[in-house]
Amino acid sequence: MQDNYTMPIYQKIALDLANKIYTGSIAEGSTLYGRSVLAGKYNVSPETIRRAIKLLEDIKIVESVKGKGVIVLSSKKALSFIKKYQDITNISSYKSNLYKLLGEKSKLENEIVETLNKIIDYSNRLEIINPLVPVQFTIEENCKYIGKTSGETKFWQNTGATIVAVKRGEELIISPGPYIEFLAGDLLLVVGDKHIYNSVPAFLYDTK
């Protein structure tokens, strides 16, 4: 998982200067303080100030003029520069939030699987059938409905059983709906009354 975007100090200084230029605290046509003064003001090295000024020069916010110093050129370009880095910060924030949500989703899915496995485990121990407890049926190679969806086969209408989940390899598909396609090896988790123990196998394999 990636960390939030961390802005280098020279970029932060460049943004601060750009903001002051945009707001008019530093006017167009004026001269910035010397590097040593700015270094003292921001408590950084002159090299850090040099990099910040160079960044502003590259996008024509300021210009270094020999014998005059650093001249402020454009408050409009200062605004564009500010917006650019706001976008970078926003994207970083969105990414961070996305990773957090994906982590929470994974945790929730694991909890669902764990809970469902517990329900299945308990259901295997019950002598009396509870219509709310899922029952397992495996789709074998000889199932006549392999490749068809539960909707196409009218699974519920023909068996009285409702598919609440399908375990396919390591994947657990919750509430698959009528478009889930039956594949060999699928483990169907269904609920219904006591008749589904006979109706489901009979439907899938023509057993009596």
Image (cartoon, helix red, strand yellow):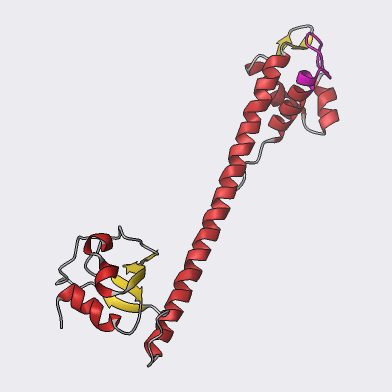
Q: As drawn, which residue projects farthest toward the front? A: 157
Name above or below for residue 69 compared with residue 111. Answer: above
Give the magenta range.
Answer: 20-33
Tell me the quarter of the image containing the C terminus.
Answer: bottom left
178 horizontally vs 8: left or right:
left
Q: Is residue 195 above or below residue 138?
A: below
In the image, is residue 4 above or below residue 48? below
Q: Residue furthest bottom?
A: 127
Residue 92 position within the rendered picture, expressed as x and y whole percent measured from the top left: 60, 41
* Picture quadrant where residue 123 is located: bottom left
Tell me where residue 16 appears, x and y as whole percent. 76, 28
Q: Is residue 28 magenta?
A: yes
Which of the 4 image quadrants contains residue 117? bottom left
The magenta stretch spans residue 180: no
The answer to which image quadrant residue 150 occupies is bottom left
Q: Residue at x 65, y 21 (%)?
A: 80
Q: Residue placed at 44% from the left, 71% from the top? A: 113
Where does the image place residue 135, in percent across and percent down from the top left? 34, 79
